[in-house]
Image (tube, grey):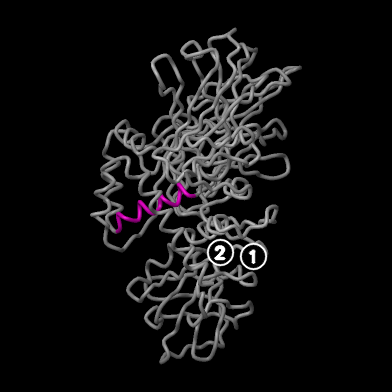
Amino acid sequence: MQHLTTPFWRKSLSFFLAFLILVYSTGCHSYFKVRYFPPDQFSDFRYYANLDDYFVLHTASGLYQLDGITFDTAFLYARIDTASAPVHYTPDRKYPKYRIYPYEKTIVKEVHFYLKDDVALPLAEKKISIPLASLEKIEVIDPDSGKTVLAVLGNLVLGYFIIGMILVIIFILTKSSCPYVYAYTGESYFMQGEIYSGAIFKGMERPDFLPLPDLQPVDNIYRIRIANELKEEQHTNLANLVVVNHPGGTQCWIDQEGKPYIVSNPKAPFEAFSESGRDYSAEMTAADHHACLFDEVDADTNRLYLGFENPGFTEEGTLLLNVKNSIWGEYVCGEFLKKFGYLYPTWIKLQNRKPPEKVKGGLDEMGFPLRVYLETDNGWELIHKTELTGSLIDRDLAIPVDLSRAKSETLHLRLESNFLFWEVDYAAMDYSLSSDMEVMELKPFQAFGTTGTDAIHALSEDDGLYLDHWNTGDWTEVHFEAPHVPEGFTQSCFLHSKGYYNHVREYTHAPALDELKKFKDPAYFNTFSKALFKSKMKEFEEEYVLN
């Protein structure tokens, strides 16, 4: 079996978002790509540029910087001045043309407008109106997520890494995710994770329970923020706060149905190994970004086997996992969606018409959930399917286990994942008996933000009323009254949400119909992931040798 086994891989991949840019002292390279807009596609430009980009106008007399850009169907309006910051991209860059060098990390913020040679504009003015018809082309510089990720993997495979190197990761908008949730700590808002991941159309709308470990009450108020920071339209049906008072010195975990569990004495597995026998016992002892990545390329199904002592004094136990989806899985999903081309909106409409149970069943068959099996007298029995959690931040999950069905005095569990789709950073069993706890679900008393509307009614009930974040940059701050904490108890909070979102995609290329037909076999998604991985690795290795 082939593995990605270096310590750096295990530590760093769990931090990655959809795109990586690594500091170049590590010997690892990042890459960019150029998104080209000919005149007949200028109207599409607005979907690919951000207001904080560096806009450069190329003219026969030199380079100019544009600020405060707005435009309509005929003109681009902006403030203009000579270019004050370095301009890194030029069409005649030397090979390797698309590699980002240490001194030009801001190249991925550049947007280039090329003025036709025979056009004269009043460039000495402070403000300018540029007819779109006078532009020859527009070029947007984007990070190349696939090549950058594989650059990291390639360096690992080829052994050019120094263990313990310093990483600088620049977080940028990814092409697919879900609403981000921030918790107020008393000083600032701190990101906690993503909600209802993978619910990319209405038929996949689902509830979610997100732990909020950093949330602190200020003036007896809990404050969270729900934000759309991606090219998506996000619709949140519910946002209540689950608050649990539990004895001091214990932990509170929650399952994906919203049931809390008091944890007082978690036990590490006495064995943890992959399908090929690789030992993961050390990786499972702490949530420290040393994770099982399900990275065995030659395995039909990637598995992690866990063995626990069974104390025998209770018939119920709780499996504790710290997990997340991987950046590679998110990248592969994006490549799959691209295959619909200009038919993507039509496909979304068709999916929206399907019953939710059929849509969810399709994802299950494709292997998206993390599957948990228990070894019983009747063989391995499926006991849980884990909903997607997002690739941004690890999440703690509780999974109930019926110990009476275990085959032997020792407890044996098996986790299954598509290739490089999940990361498991911690695993333990807790056999704590019932403990005193008080569970409350709080409705917001205040909800306001960029939409300019009071969102309390939309968020308080699962009733079909939605908080709509239609645009990148939309956010809503939600306030809850903090309950009293009895003496000797501590308080844990979880966001109970429900909703769905739509990707904003303007694909113009033709659909890859022959390739899409292959996905009628649900198992093909895993095959596609591994084939894409091997292809990208080969592509990178060839380029690496040349450079």
Left or right of 134, for residue 404: right
Q: Amino acid at mark 2?
A: Ser
Q: Nearer the viewer, residue 288 or 443?
A: 288
Percent from the top left, x then y, of residue 259?
A: 53, 21
Report the disc number at residue 30: 2
Which residue is the extreme one toward the top? Answer: 313
Q: Is residue 333 magenta?
A: yes
Circle 2 residues within 10 Å: few <14, some 14–19, many ≥20: many
Quarter holding the C terminus is bottom right
Percent from the top left, x then y, of residue 41?
A: 35, 71
Magenta region: 328-341
Q: Are marks 1 and 2 in contact (CB under 8 Å)?
A: yes
Residue 88 higher or lower than 43, as above or below: below
Q: Nearer the viewer, residue 390 or 288?
A: 288
> Residue at point 49% right, 76% down?
112
Marks 1 and 2, how far apart in space?
8 Å
> Residue at point 30% right, 52% down?
345
> Residue at point 63% right, 39% down?
183
Residue 268 higher or lower than 197, as above or below: above
Q: Amino acid at mark 1?
A: Tyr
Quarter of the image for residue 466 reads top left
Percent from the top left, x then y, of residue 257?
A: 48, 24
Which of the marked residues, 1 or 2, is nearer the chain's N terminus?
Answer: 1
Quarter of the image for residue 339 reads bottom left
Q: Nearer the viewer, residue 527 or 464?
A: 527
> Residue at point 43% right, 22% down?
383
Q: Is residue 264 magenta?
A: no
Residue indicated by mark 1: 24
Badge 2 element = strand
